[in-house]
Image: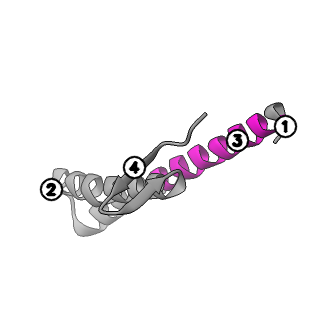
Amino acid sequence: MAELTVEIAGFKWGGFAMTRAFWLIVVLFGIPGTAFGQSDLSDSQTLHALLTEVRALCAFGKRACLERAQADKFISRVVGD
């Protein structure tokens, strides 16, 4: 199975770097939209909501990364690399 690789402005992106870039975009554009949607809350409530969402995203990212690593390990054992 070939790795997905994209070339942007002379730099090749693939695998872990691409995943990192994806999560950076999610955090930069997703979190502020959520924060503006909760503008009627006080600052401390907004901060608490943001921290909760960031923690959830981090947990999801770690879980996805772990699942990918386990799948890669399983595939390498099956293939025998």
The CA span between labels 4 and 2 is: 41 Å
Which disc, if any, is residue 6? 4
The CA span between labels 4 and 1 is: 28 Å
Say which label, 3 or 1, has the lower sequence index.
3
What element does badge 1 sit on? loop
What element does badge 4 sit on? strand
Magenta segment, which residues?
56-77
Say which label, 4 or 2, has the lower sequence index.
4
Which disc, if any, is residue 80? 1
Which part of the image, by quadrant, shows the N terminus? top right
Say which label, 4 or 1, has the lower sequence index.
4
**Which x, y percent locates residue 26?**
33, 52
Amino acid type, callout 1: Gly
Q: Is residue 60 magenta?
A: yes
Residue farthest to the bottom, as pictured: 43
The CA span between labels 2 and 3 is: 45 Å
Q: Provide the major secondary structure of the magenta segment.
A: helix
Say which label, 2 or 3, has the lower sequence index.
2
Q: Is residue 38 above or below residue 2?
A: below
Residue 25 visible? The answer is yes
Amino acid type, callout 3: Asp
Residue at screen point 25% across, 55% down: 29
Q: Is residue 13 left or right of residue 3?
A: left
Residue highlighted by disc 3: 72
**Which x, y percent locates residue 36?**
16, 56
**Which x, y percent locates residue 57?**
45, 51
The CA span between labels 1 and 2 is: 57 Å
Front of the two marks 1 and 2: 1
Residue at screen point 44% across, 56% down: 13
Residue contact at pointers 4 and 2, CB within 8 angstroms: no
